[in-house]
Image (cartoon, rainbow, N blue to C red):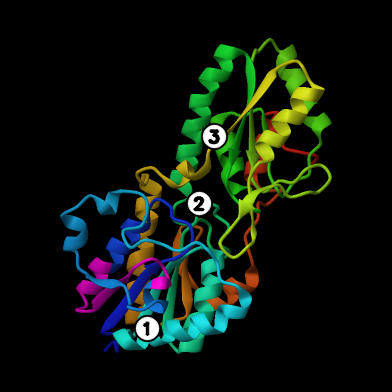
Amino acid sequence: MSEIKKIGILTSGGDCSGLNVAISAVVKAATLKNWTVYGIHNGTEGLTERPLSYEILTPQNFSETPWAKTAGSYLGSLNKGVKPELMDEVARRFGEGVRELGLDAVIVLGGDGSMNVLQRYCSQAGIKMIGIPKTIDNDTPLTDISIGFETACQVCMDSIDSIETTARSHHRAMIVEMMGRDAGHLALQSAVAGGADVCLIPEIPYTLDGIIKKLEAVKASGRTYALIVVSEGIKTENGEMLSLGKNMIGEKVHGGIGDYLANLLNEKYNGFQIRCTRLGHVQRSGHPVYGDRMLATLFGAKAVDLLSNGQTNVMVGLDHGRVDCYPLKDVVSAGSKRVDVHGVYVQAAKLLGMYIGEI
């Protein structure tokens, strides 16, 4: 018989679509086992700040409101990072919060960074943990896909479609800057699905001459507009990371490469007038598409099943259509998942004539 009686659930890091579906799935599955589910507010802050901030969750939280079918997090999230010198102190307060509530385990919805940090907190507190991967960047390792990625791709593809009408009307080359940090999954898959002419991602070097050559080919074909997709994490030709600011602990955050390239290309090439649109946080929005709803439901149910069977300190993941789990230590040691430069999406882009860099 399971020793679990009380569990906590929290969302950590940037929000995305599908979080509420996963929370709802956990609550439904846990309630059937007569467990009490504590929804921790605002990521780890709900356990590390005083007074503690939480609520008891039941299936009614999601059946009487549209929360389960909306983007964002019903519980609130935290995405500001922790300075290394404060990690031990925050871990101590986290453990105190867990013990004050009497939690037997914590389910964490987070990306690769959250898995790293929360695994450390739970380990130091001696608390059982199950991780559920979520991120629009799709860079969490050891899982084929994370919650939120498919909806973000849909939003980005729809944005490309919308911007194309303006590009066609004004005979321009339009740059669309997308999120993704140091991984190009979101930009690449959205560009392929959206029919872009150029896609630049952090994993593949590029040249301005390469971009211009592609724009010249588009112009020569008789088409009067072009679409360029860039991932926020690409660097300048000189290897410089561009940033629009810093986060709450002083780390630079990506942003600005789209405008930088638009200015350079306008100076060096007059075949198209070039403008940039930075999608920003709209990429985290959108009602979860079928793929994210199903993935979140499968992951949430699996997390409760694992706890019920005594398996802990693992992350749920999808491996070629099969829901499995992986030790958190392996997830942390694997690091961020980058685009496979020899994979099917890069190959498709090349076969379609897209300029994807010097590869």
Query: Which amino acid does the dot numbered 2 rest on?
Result: Ile
Name the mark nearer the viewer: 2 or 1.
Answer: 1
Q: Residues within 10 Å of mark 3 (few under 14, many from 20)?
A: some
Is 325 colored magenta in this rendering?
A: no
Choose top left, top right, bottom left or bottom right for residue 304: bottom left
- Dot 3 amino acid type: Ala
Mark closer to the observer (1, 3): 1
Q: Are marks 2 and 1 in contact (CB under 8 Å)?
A: no
Question: From the viewer's perspective, is residue 271 above or below residue 87?
Answer: above
Q: Residue at x 38, y 42 (%)?
A: 286
Give the quarter of the figure containing the N terminus: bottom left
Instruction: Compare marks 2 and 1 and give the one earlier in the sequence.
Output: 1
Q: Is residue 146 left or right of residue 256?
A: left
In the figure, residue 349 lies in which quadrant?
Answer: top right
Q: Nearer the viewer, residue 296 or 254?
A: 254
Instruction: Write down the quadrant of residue 350 in the picture.
Output: top right
Mark nearer the N terminus (3 vs 2):
2
Residue 182 screen position, x and y as percent: 66, 53
Mark number displayed over residue 136? 2
State how far apart marks 1 and 3 are (Cα): 45 Å
Task: Please give the label number shown on residue 174.
Answer: none
Q: Secondary structure at mark 1?
A: helix
* Residue in view at x 22 percent, y 77 percent: 33
Query: Disc 3 marks which residue?
Result: 193
Looking at the rendering, the stretch of residues picked out in magenta corresponds to 27-45
Whether residues under marks 1 and 3 lie with C-beta atoms below 8 angstroms apart, the answer is no
Q: Earlier in the sequence, mark 1 or mark 3?
A: 1
| Residue holding disc 1 | 97
Measure the C-alpha gap from mark 2 to mark 1: 29 Å
